[in-house]
Image (tube, rainbow, N blue to C red):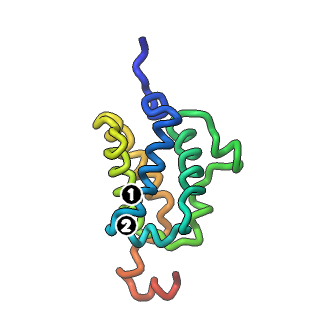
Amino acid sequence: MNQPSTPYQILGEDGIRQLTSAFYDLMDELPEVAELRALHARDLAPMKTKLAEYLIGWMGGPPLYAQKYGGVCMTEPHAPYAIGPALRDQWLFCMERALERTGASEELREMLKVPLFRIADAIRNRDKDPGDNPDLIASV
């Protein structure tokens, strides 16, 4: 019998949806990520669905996001927001905690560590955080 080789094969669609739900639940719960939470609408349900559909395809499953929305470019929808290293790291913090909360194996967490960082860093559109440079605050 073949061992699962993709995150989708390991988690399945339901597991990825649970991961995404835990991710946004943590964003609501953790004071350390209040800045990240403030960028989102009060109702996180639509984002839970969108991120789950994106991650299902990204993790090796059917391309639900692409089928529904067309392309899968993640930088364009995030362009209006000033995303620096701190917000990137808050996103990664939530994702790491969500993987823990949903019982993801250490092997899976290691498998996803670098690819998740690459996604989060690709969405980053500022080299510094607004608090790091007063001139940046005016341009945000």
The amino acid sitting under disc 1 is Leu
83 relative position to 29: left or right: right
The amino acid sitting under disc 2 is Val
Crowd class of label 2 (few under 14; some 14 to 19; many from 20; radius 10 Å): some
124 relative position to 77: left or right: left
Q: Quadrant of residue 30?
A: bottom left
131 relative position to 72: left or right: left
Which numbered dot is residue 26?
Answer: 1
Which residue: 50% across, 73% down?
Answer: 82
Which residue: 44% across, 45% down?
Answer: 19
Under circle 2, the secondary element is helix
Q: Point out the residue furthest to the left here.
A: 106
Under circle 1, the secondary element is helix
Which badge, 2 or 1, is on the more N-terminal residue?
1
Image height check: is 90 above or below 2?
A: below
Disc 2 + disc 1, Cβ < 8 Å: yes
Residue ID for mark 2: 33
Which residue: 47% across, 72% down?
Answer: 38
Residue 75 at x, y = what percent? 57, 60
- Per the model, the C-alpha gap separating discs 2 and 1 is 9 Å
**Nearer to the camera, 18 or 135:** 18
